[in-house]
Amino acid sequence: MRKWHISRDITEYLRFYQEIGVEYLHDVFPRPQDCLETISADIARCSACGLHRTRKKPVMGAGNPQADLMFVGEAPGHEEDRQGKPFVGAAGKLLTDIILAMQFSRETVYIANVLKCRPPQNRNPREEEMEACLPFLFRMVDCIKPKVICTLGAFPAQALLKTGSPISRLRGKFWEFNGIKVMPTYHPAYLLRNPDAKKAVWEDMQKVMELFGKKAGHTKKSHA
């Protein structure tokens, strides 16, 4: 009986929108892509912190708007600022290798940063800059609704998990953000400076793969 009531309620709900001229459901419930495009437009005109004055291009995000797996880095670098795309420099190439080793692709995941504008000389994000940009990230996560978020580096992990703990203590286990599993790990740029840390990152990524029912292969790419 309860199921019948739910069905009736949905029918009446849809009939109401039909009567007021709504032809498609995505006019009521925006598609993830439409949602992200709205956020992108808001980012393009944002002046909430001083970084908008020094940026070349704001960097939104890239990938599948309905991705089950999302990667979140810290901030755009030189190449990202020039191209307006996330993770396209040397660290981006390494991230691509990691994603491929996980049996995903850049087209099937979503990649973004906490900051949407490059800090001068690639310095660390400042608190006021993080506060200005985090609402955009939260909106993006709400649009995409991933099953897992891999945070890359200390800043995104600390921001999502609301902690001051170092990345060395956070990595390697799942946490939670608004019902979404979060796996913190080291940033690819850190791996370029500290190749020995690649093993730890691969261990973290294997746990993510297991969650998706994927088994790690024993290839050279397995360690990025």
Image: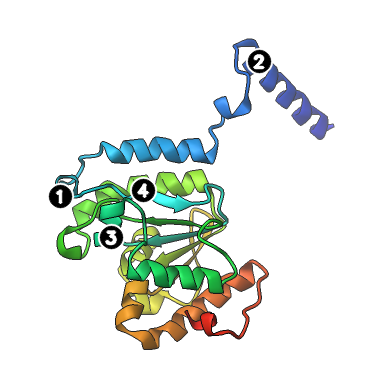
Circle 2 sits in a helix, a strand or a loop, which is it?
A: helix
Instruction: Give the CA separation, mark 3 to mark 1.
Output: 14 Å
Residue 120 spot, x, y in % from top left: 15, 59
Write down the quadrant of residue 103 in the picture: bottom right
Instruction: Give the CA separation, mark 2 to mark 1.
Output: 48 Å
In front here: 47 or 16?
47
Q: Nearer the viewer, mark 4 or mark 3?
A: 3
Closer to the chain start, of discs 2 and 1, is 2
Closer to the chain start, of discs 3 and 2, is 2
The three-letter code of the residue at mark 1 reads Thr
Residue that appears at 28% across and 47% down: 58
The three-letter code of the residue at mark 2 reads Gln
In front here: 158 or 208?
208
Circle 1 sits in a helix, a strand or a loop, which is it?
A: loop
Q: Which residue is mark 1?
A: 54
Closer to the chain start, of discs 1 and 4, is 1
Residue 79, numbered label: 3
Q: Which residue is mark 2?
A: 18
Do tag 1 and tag 4 residues touch (Cβ < 8 Å)?
no
In front here: 75 or 19?
75
Residue 215 spot, x, y in % from top left: 66, 76
